[in-house]
Amino acid sequence: MEVSLVIGIVACGSSACPLPSADLGELLLVGKYQSQGVISNTLNSFENFTFVVPSDISGQASIQVQRVSLATPPVSLFHKLSDYLIHSAAKGHALPGVQYTAVAVQVT
């Protein structure tokens, strides 16, 4: 289950670009991933994005991405708190997954 998708851009200058887990940069999109289809065997699905690069970014930069998803359906609100704390893994409660990726770009 998709929870959120955050895409940002960060200027790198002459130094190494930061890891996306440390700095997402200037935010370009905050929303949910919404698949637009499937491409061959290399990608399960895709979504196209178009961004306007902020005017203060030029030269070496990095598109930084954070994706948050849940591995299983959310926990029922009717479970007791003690059951959740003691047996959450056994009852198949939702487990969040956070993925980061970055793509180096040259902004001209």
Image: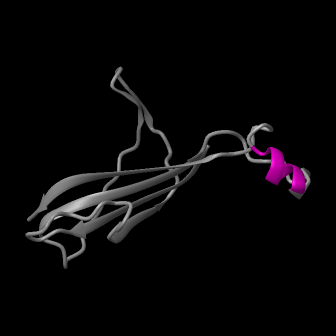
Which residue of the protein is positioned furthest toward the bottom in this rendering?
56
The quadrant of the picture occupied by the N terminus is top right
Residue at horizontal 77 percent and vertical 45 percent from the top: 88
Q: How is the image coloured?
A: one colour
Residue 52 placement, left or right of 84: left
Specify whether residue 101 is painted magenta: no
Q: Is residue 68 above or below residue 17?
A: above
Residue at horizontal 49 percent and vertical 48 percent from the top: 33
Which residue of the protein is positioned furthest toward the front in this rendering?
86
Overall secondary structure of the magenta stretch?
A: helix
Q: Position of residue 55 (x, y in %)?
A: 19, 77
The quadrant of the picture occupied by the C terminus is bottom left
Residue 84 placement, left or right of 64: right
Q: Position of residue 106 (x, y in %)?
A: 11, 59
Observer-nearest of 8 and 55: 8
Which region of the structure is painted magenta? Answer: 82-88
Observer-nearest of 8 and 40: 8
Q: Position of residue 25 (x, y in %)?
A: 32, 70
Q: Position of residue 38 (x, y in %)?
A: 42, 28
Residue at horizontal 27 percent and vertical 58 percent from the top: 63
Specify whether residue 85 is painted magenta: yes
Residue 58, by quadrant, is: bottom left
Residue at horizontal 72 percent and vertical 41 percent from the top: 73
Observer-nearest of 4 and 88: 88
